[in-house]
Amino acid sequence: MTCPAVLRIIFGDDSDSRKLPLVSGLPATVEELQTTIKTFFQLAEDFRLQYMDSDFNAFMNLTDMSDVQDKGTVKVICMTTMLPEEPTVMLYPVDPGQLNPHPTSPPETSPDSLLPQTTSSLASSSSDDTVHTSTPHSSPQVQLSKCSCWPKIFVVPKFSYEAELELQLKNDEFERDGAYFNPGPKLKGQILDGLAQEIMKYTKYPKDYQCDEVAEALTRAHPCLGQLGNRTGFWGWKQSLKYKLQNYRTKLGRLGDPEIRVNSLKHKRKGQGKAAASIKKPRKAEVHYIPLHPKGETAESLEEERVSILSEMKKRFNEVVIKTKMEKTFSLRRLEIVDERPMIEDFKDRWPALFQESGVNDEFMRITTKPLLSKFFAQLDHFSPKLNSLFKSKGGAKGQKMKNILAVYDECDEIDAKRECVLKSLIIYLNEDPASLVKEYLATAIEDAENDLAQTVMCIFVVRGGDFPDNIWVVIEGVKVLSNVRSVIVAFALLFGLIYALDLSYPDNLKYTFEFVQKVLMNMDGHKLNVKIQQLKMKMFI
C-alpha cells in the first residue's frame, strides 16, 4: 500500500501557499499531479508546475515525478496569455439627408460613450436598415455562449459557505485519521444540486463516462467523501447523481426548457407511451442541440424573421444580413428539425439559406462550436502521410484497391483530388464501399443519374465529362440538397455538416467512416471508439 504524502503548493509569490494532501501517495506522472491540483484547488485556467531544486535552490520546470518528494514544494505557474484584441468595425445606420460630402471633424465623445454597449442596447439599436458584422455566437440576440463543450477536466463547483466549511473540516479529519464522512440528507442534497447545475452548463443528458468523471472529481476534491465497498470509491455518488439529474430535468421541463420538453409524454408519437422511448438528445457531441429562443423573441416573431430571409435571398450581395437572420432564428430551426422531423424537401423550401456551403459551415459552428471545413481539411492533411503509409502496408485484395487509388494520389497535384484519394482509401480500410458514398456518371448518362437520385437516401453524385466541369451534387432522401459543389471532398465535408444540421443518423453502410471523422479527425466525443477505429487510431499515433 502506498504511503500518504503531502505537498506545499505555491500560487504566485510565497505569500500564497497551501497544503495538498495525497492520501494515495505521490502520483506516477506529472500529468496526474496537474489533474489532482486542478481538481483539489478548483482551478479553471491552464498552468505548468515547477519544483524546488536542491542544487540551485531555485524553482525549475517539473518534467519528472522523481524530482518531487514527500513534503516537497511545488509552484503553480499560470499560462494565461494575453491575446491581441481583434480590430472591430462598428457600422451604424445613417440618414441619407444628413450626409455631407465635405469631411468634418469627428463628434465629441464622452468617457461613457467609450464603454462597451450592453446586450440590451445593442439589441435595441439594430434594425432592418443596420448592416451587421458578426461571427458565430457573437450576435447578442442569440445568447449561445452559456453552453460549451464537455471539459477535459471537470472542476467541482463551490458549494454554499456552510457546506464548504463542513467539508473542509471533514477533509482535515480524514487527512488526520483516515475517517470517511457520510453526509446527511441536507448536505448531500446541496452537493448533488451544485454538481447537477454545473453539468447542465455542458449537457442536459450526460453520458455514463461523464457521470464517472464528475463523481471521481468530487472524491478527489473532497477525499472524505470517498466510499468503501466498491471498486471505484465513488459508485454511490455516481448513482445518486444520475437520480438527481433525472429530477433536475423534470423541473426544467416544467419550466419550459425546449430540449427537455421535446421528450415529454405529450410529445411522443403513438406507440411510444414511455418517457424513455426514443429520447431526442445530443448523440454526436452537439453542444447547442435545442437552444432557448433569443431574449424578447417568440416563435411567432422568429417565424416572421424566417419569412424575411426568403425575400433577402432574392437580393444580391446580401450575405451578411442573411447570416445575421439565420443566427437569430437558430433556435426556431433546431426545434423544428428535432421535434417535427420534417421531410428534407419541405425543410429546404422553408430554409433555403441553410443549403449553401456557407450556410452549412455556419450551422455546424452554431451546433458544435467548431469550424467545419477548416478543421476537417487541416486534420485530414495533418494525418494524410501517416494514413497513406498504413494504407500502402495493407495486403490482400483490400490492399490492392487502396494502392490503385493511391497511385492517383501520387500522380495528381490538385489538393482536393489528393484528399479524395485519402478518403476513399480510408473507407476501404474500414471495410466499407466508396461506391456507396460516391456515384459517378458520364455526362451522356445524366438521365440515369436523375432516375437513381429519387431512390437514394444519402450519397454524393458526380457527373463527369462533357464540355463543362464535373457537376457534383449532395443528395439526401432523394433530394438534391447541394449542387455545383467544387469537389468531392468538399461535398463529403458538407454532407457531414448537413447530418448535424438536419439531426440525421450516420448511414449504416458508412457509419465507421463518419464516426472516424467525428471522433478522430474532428475530435468530438472521442472517449468511446469502435474497435476498428480504436485500432486505426492507435496505429496513427505510433
Image (cartoon, grey):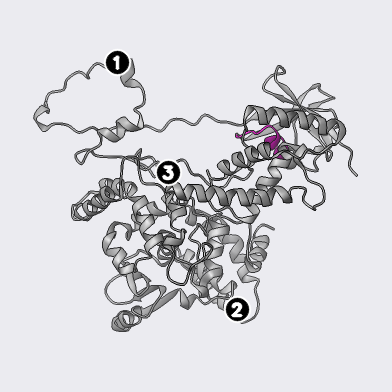
User: Who comes first in sequence, dot 3 or dot 2?
Assistant: 3
Q: Secondary structure at mark 1?
A: loop
Location of residue 386 with respect to 27 vertically, above or below: below
Kind of residue sitting beneath label 3? Leu
88 in the magenta segment: no
Specify the quadrant that holds the N terminus: top right
Q: Which residue sits at x=35%, y=29%? A: 118
Q: Is residue 72 left or right of residue 389?
A: right
Give left or right: position of 48 versus 362. Answer: right
Circle number at residue 401? none
Amino acid under disc 1:
Ser
**Residue marked by disc 2:** 398
The answer to if 38 sits in the magenta stretch is yes
The alpha-carbon separation of the residues under discs 1 and 3 comes to 32 Å
Badge nearest the viewer, 3 or 2: 3
- Determine crowd level at label 2: few under 14, some 14-19, many 20+ residues with C-alpha closer than 10 A: some
The residue identified by callout 3 is 144
- Image vertical order of residue 223 relative to residue 407, above or below: above
Q: Is residue 342 visible?
A: yes
Q: Is residue 21 left or right of residue 307?
A: right
* Snapshot quadrant of residue 404: bottom right
Residue pictured at 12% horizontal, 28% vertical = 99
Cα distance in 3D space between marks 3 and 2: 45 Å
